[in-house]
Structures are given as structure tokens and as C-alpha cells.
Amino acid sequence: MRRVEVAPTFEAWREVAREALKDGYRPEEINLADATVPVSGLLTLQAEDEPQGAMVARPHVPKEFLERARSVAAHREARRWNLLYRVLWRLQSERRLLRMELDADVAEFGRLEQQVRRDLHKMHAFVRFRRIVDEDGEQFVAWHEPDHRIVPLAAPFFAERFAVMRWAILTPDECVSWRPETKELIFGPGVPRETAPQADELEGLWRSYYGAIFNPARVNPKAMRAEMPVRYWKNLPELTQLPNLMQKAESRVQSMMIRQSRQPTAAPFVPEEHTLTVLREALPRCEGCDLFRHATQVVPGAGAAHAALMLVGEQPGDQEDLQGEPFIGPAGAILRRAMEELGIDAEQVYVTNAVKHFKFVSRGKFRLHQNPKMSEISACRPWLLAEIDAVKPSVILCLGASAAKSLLGGTFALMKQRGEPQESTHARHVYATVHPSAVLRGADEEGRAQLYAYLKADLATAWAQVLKCE
Amino acid sequence: MKARITFALCSLPEMALNRDMAMLSVQNKLEILADAAKYDASCASSGAKRAGNSKGVGHTDGMGICHSYTPDGRCVSLLKILLTNYCTYDCVFCVNRVSSDIRRARFSPQEVVGLTLDFYKRNYIEGLFLSSGIIQSPDYTMEQLIEVAKTLRSVHHFGGYIHLKTIAGCDERLVQEAGRWADRLSVNIELPSQSDLVQLAPEKKAVVIEGTMGQIRAKKDAAEDEGKALRSAPKFAPAGQSTQMVVGATETTDRQIILRASTLYGGYKLRRIYYTGFSPYPEADARLPLKATPLMREHRLYQADWLMRFYGFSAEEITTESAPQLSLDEDPKTTWAKAHPEFYPVDVNAAPREALLRVPGIGHRNVERILRIRTYHRMSMEDLRKLHVRVKSVAGYVVAADHLPTAPAAGAMPTAQMELFAASSALSGQV
């Protein structure tokens, strides 16, 4: 049997294969050996017989074979040269050979091709450039260790993608670099790992991103390893922190669950029976959120048990907190004035708040009102809903943004939508207007007058609706 | 509201700051805004082709590449972030809702542009997937997202992949402009039904969401018509549109979800629907379940989705009125096969494609291979084994050159074969 050493490039194999076909070597008569694999002396001493096959001067080489063979040639498997020759030789008489997927040679050909293509895909994916600056300006250099000899196959992808950058990819067997000025791929021999830059300033950001983008509740390291085999990990900067991330994932999920189960809500404190008497009795026991700790007392709603109009404010103020009644402070006075001017019958109105405890910060002798957080408004919502269910008003008027957000959702834009009928399941008619305390806080006389006019106009709209309903 | 005031104060830091300071703050924002984006399942970077250009970095070859994989087994293909996680909406299932007490941050469009280019040049990513909480108004938010895409394309000649979340209900003019710069647009349907939305996303309305989807479809159709007449006509979102729905946050059945998906695919020519099993997150609303939806349910929904798109199943036949949930123990194709013994056995050497596709254990790629091979060769069970078909699972359903099914089809074992598609596709980032 004749033995020929083939250098590890597709072109070298093509030369050898063309000569062998021309001479009429049948696949079993010639050994196309991998030149990179050291051989024992015995093999080279084999006798060379005359070729017995038909001589092929003008071989039939389908384009598809040529393209796929280029991939197979990049495989490290030493037997690939013989396999390629066998397939090429058979193609001369079996023109449809490549369609025969179940044929052993074709299946092997396909398997090697597939492995190279996968490696190629992984190289496109896992090359990590590091930016360095030298006398010629910035350059992006990567160190990569592919399974197969695929640098020439992989390089055009990077040339197209990073055409405007000066870049180089270094591997143990081959290197390639690109200069945007000449637009040429320059190939060279392999280099040791130390030649490549060891860090990049962006890698900290990239690690942060990697650590933040996965869902700790769904850790699945098996799936991760299947797609990104462990052998690639050492050259991927984002994976240096992996053990740490995995460890933290579990505790992150734990703390999430604990925190979620502690999300404040009054729901467990709200009785099932929704009558004002029952609700009033239960309210003082509410510890649904932390506000009860500092307030003097809870402030329930007040007014007619089956009022047609319900006014919902934000939360009790300093005076209300001390006396336990809603709207008895300065804001309440403004509200009463508007109602009197409009001739609204207080007997037909129920007033309450979105949040039932006073929230404040102490400043010396004063207790300064603080806006409730959305989580506190949400926590208190079950009380408000129970009150609405007990009173069953035909019209609700929300006073201020907190009440409006509690009943109409977080996007409610008060100044844009005040006074307009809102779509809601809470009552047949729902409106929102400014809070009476906003009137007190108006910037100047004119502003205060304007805000008061809004309050009064919207109250009038709501009241007109009440009269219409009756 | 508190959130809005904080937002106004949070004006954008100047890039002129000391570089270290700027890095630190971008890093914090990145942590917050990537964390907030992680519940969006979409990671695909496929479906669009754009050649490299001589002025800027980037090209897409239509395949999609996963540049890394995270410990949850998911593909990292795009820089997936929110422009901001401030949001005026109060969707119960969403971690970024206004009533959630989480850390908030906001990128400037310029910062996102810089990060995208920096990451791209190092080959970390295929491009950008940008979404956002709703700030000020849907239009304002959309304008900000467009600003990023437009700057990348027209100032930096960026040729990589851009996926823009389209804010439902934004002005039609903005949809048009978004499609001009982006490869893919998506509007999240959020929850499977309108009643789910009423329950958990009070500000979102199915008609508004679908209105925007309809606009995207119409504009894409129009651009494709123009492209046929004139090749240089501007493209509109060449990678099409996708959507996402959260499953398991409400009682909606798999049957309702599948029927809904089928309507969406048909009505808006969606490339993909992503199903995200609800999973708990910090500061979640007390109305939500404490435990995550089983991953298997999400997986079964993807399998059902695949059956509709690649296996010729109609939405109605995947589940039944009386059993509206997909089985967690077996794949939906096996469930169907057990319920329809009259359909089997299927002769691998004679049956049409539609029948082969209904054999549990034979995937659509193998169906194509079988169709090719049998033109020159009568296939045996051993041949199927060579194609990596699980012979044990298909034995009860097929006739081959050397095989007749002995056991009744209904006795066949559940098969794991189907899992190859959904799982690998969810991971590979391909459509």
C-alpha cells in the first residue's frame, strides 16, 4: 500500500487526491496519512504496489462535495484524509452518493462535517476580544482554543463583522489578523497563550451583566454545560465568577420568597362580613403594614351607612390621628366649605381615606405629614374595598392622587383626568379631584383660588350625578 | 406620586464625569436594568440578514448566535436591558410596577449606545434588545427607545441586531420609525386573556396591544410589497415581530393559551410567541402565587406551539374541552396519539409527510430525512436507529420494512424525543 503524508490543509489533500485519482489508486491501495501525527518507522517501510483502479484524468467533483469536504478537512480526526478520498473515489461511479445518508462513509462524512460546523459556530460565539493600545492605535486581540483547525474557515465571519477594527485571533495552531486599511486576512503560525492580552477594562461590566441577567429561581447547570462545554470556560471572562453566582442564586431565591411572603397587606385583618360596624370594630387590630406602630390610632371612615356619595382622601392628618375622626383638620374645613357652598347634604355623604393610619416624620414639636408609599396604599386597599362594599355608593370621588391610584391604578394622571368620569368597577360613577390640602398648599392666592375652584367644580359634578341617580 | 418625583430628580449624569465615577455608575445601572430585563424570555437574534459595512461594526447572517449561556441554561445573545425600570403602570405580575419598592435607575440613550458598541466590539453580543418601563407616556417612552436605535444605525453605522420593545398604544408614526431602525419589534401580550389583564394589569388593554401589533403587521406587509417592486425600498423590521405572555400567574388554562396563541400567529404573522412561566421576584404582590410555575408547564406549551407551527396540528386538537391542561408527564404529541389509536400505525415507507409528523418520537427534521431516504431505500427499524430515532418509543406507532407494531399504540411509553426541539430552540436563540 502506498503511503502519502498530507499536511493539515484542505489544499494539500486536494493535490494528493488529484494525483492519486489520476494514477488510479483505489481507496484500499493508498493511505493518506495525517502529517501532524508522528508515525512509527515500520509503517514507512511498506511496499508500494502498482495501482489497480481505473485512471481518472478529469475527476467528477460536485460543488457540494468540495464545500463540505473543506469543513471535514479542518477536523483533527487523522482518518479524515482517507475518508475524503474514499468518498471522492466512490463519487466517480456513484453520482448520487452524497444523498445516501445511511451509507457508512456518507454518515461519517456528515458526522465530521457537523462537528466542525459546531466548532465553527462556537468560535464565532466564544471568541472574546481584548482591547489594547499600541503605537498604531487600538487593536482587539483574542485568545481562543478551537477543537479543530478552523481558523481559516472562521476568519471571514470576523472580517465581515469587524471590518473597521484592527483585530487578531490567536490560537495554539494558527493565528489570523486583519487590518482595516488593507482589508486582508493575514494567517500565521500558532502562538503560546501568554502572547495574548490578559484583561480588558470592559470585562467588569460584562461580568456584572452576566451576573444580573439570569433568573436565580431557574438554575439549570446541565442545560448550560450542554451548550457551553466546560472546556471553553477558561477563556470566557464572564465565567470566572460562576461558582460564586451559583452559590448566591439559591440564597437570592430564598430571600425573595421570604420578602414576598412579607409583602404588607391588610387582607388577613379584614373581616369577611362587610358592614360598617364590623369593620370599625376590626380596624384597630390591623397590623397589615408598619404604619400602625407610630400612629396614635386608626381612623375609620365616617358618615351615612348607605351614602350615595363616597369621598376618599389620602390618609389621616395630625388632628385626625389625635381625635380618630376623618377630615376634621384644616383640609376638612376646606372640604366642608365647598360642600356647604354647593348645598351638599352631609347626611348623604360618607368620607374615608385610602390609608387608615397617619404617616409622619417628627420635626421638633411638629409631626410632618409624609406621603404613603405605594406599597402602603396597596396594603390598606382591602379596607377601602370592604368599606365600598358596605356602603355601596353610587358615586365615588377620589380626593387627591393617592386615593385615585388606589382605586384607578398607578398610571392615573390627576391633573389631566380630574373631573372626568372614570371607567371602574368600584361604583357606577367614579371621579377624581384635587385633595383639599392641596388647596391649602397652593403657591399663592391665585393658585389657591384655582385649586379650590377645581375641587368645587368636581364636587359639583359628582353631586349632580348623585341627584341624577336618585 | 413618589415615583414620578424621584424620576424627575434623576436627571442623567454627564458623560464628562471622571471616567471611574462614570464607570461605577454605569455598572450600577447595568446591574439594576439587566436584572429588571431578565424576565423577558426572548433572546433570539435570528431572522434578519445584513451585510457588514465599511463605516461601522456589525453584521447579521440570519442565524443568530448565543455568545454565552447563563446558569439558568439560557442563551446570552443580545445585550438585554431596560432603558429604565421606572414605570407608571401597576401590573401586578411585573417586578417594575409603580407600587414595587425596588431600586430604580435610568440609562441615557447615549449610555446604552456606548455599552452596545463596547460589548459588540469585544464579541460579547449579537446586538441590543431594548425595552423600558413606561415613563411619562407611551409616546415619550417609545421616542427614547427609537433614539437609541437611530443613533446606533445612523451615527455609528451599527450593523448588528436590534430588537426594540414596542410600547403598546404609542403613536403610529413611532411604530413606523421603530421598524425602520430595528430588526425585530415586539409588543408583549403580557397575559393570555383580557380578563387576566383586567385582574393583573389594569392599565393594559388587549385591544390597545393588538392594535399596535396590527400596525406592525400592516407596515411590514406594505414594506414587503414595496420591496418586491423596488429592491432598494426601505425595509421594515426584517426579523418580524414576536410577543411574550406570562403563564401561571392566573387560572387561565393551557387550552385557552394555545387557542390565543394560534389567533395571534394568524392575525399578526408573529415569528415567535414566548411563554414565561411565572416566577417569584422581590417585592411581588401578595395576590400572586408564591411558587414558580413548573418549568415543565412552560416546556409543554412550547411543544404545543411547535406542534402548531411545524407539525400541522390545529390549536383545537392539541387539548380537549374536557382536558384543557397539557400533561406534565408526557409531551402533547404522545397525548394526542394515545387518544387517536385509529390514526396508527403509520408506514414510514409510504405515509405522507403529515402522517409521519404525527408519530411521537419522530421530529420534523427526521421526517424530512425519511422522505429523502425512502426514495432509494426501504427503511428498517435499524435505519431509524441510525437517524437517532428512539426506536422503543416509535415501535408501537410505525410500520417499517422489518417491523409491524405488536402492542396497541395506546400502550406506548411516553417519549422524551420531543424535548429535543423545544429545549434546544429555547437555548439556541434561533427562531
Image: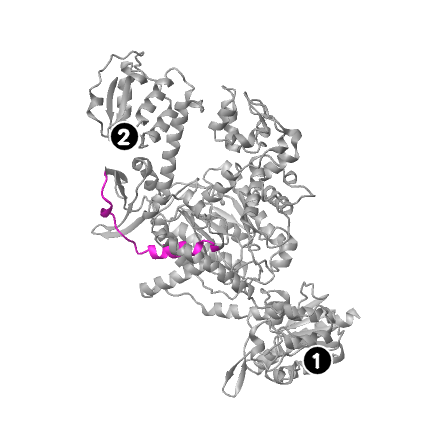
Position of the C terminus of chain A, as image quadrant, is bottom right
Query: A383 or B414: which is nearer to us?
Result: B414
The answer to whether the residues at label 2 and label 1 have Cβ atoms under 8 Å apart is no
Specify the segment rendered in magenta. A189-216
- Placement of A7 over or under B183, stated as above or below: above
Residue assigned mark 1:
A339
Q: Residue at image x 34%, y 18%?
A: A89
Asked whether residue A164 appears in the rendered view, the answer is: yes
Q: Residue furthest right?
A: A470
Residue A191 is a magenta residue: yes
Label 1 residue SS: helix
Q: Chain of mark 2?
A: A
**Badge 2 local density, few (<14 within 10 Å), some, or many (20+)?**
few
Eye-nearest disc, 2 or 1: 2
* Residue type at tag 1: Met
Pinpoint the chain carrying mark 1: A
Q: Position of residue B27 (x, y in %)?
A: 38, 60
Residue found at x 35% / y 26%: A66
What is the x, y in percent for residue B412?
Answer: 59, 33
Disc 2, SS: loop
Quadrant of res A24: top left
Decide if residue A133 is on the left or right side of residue A290: left
Residue hosting label 2: A9
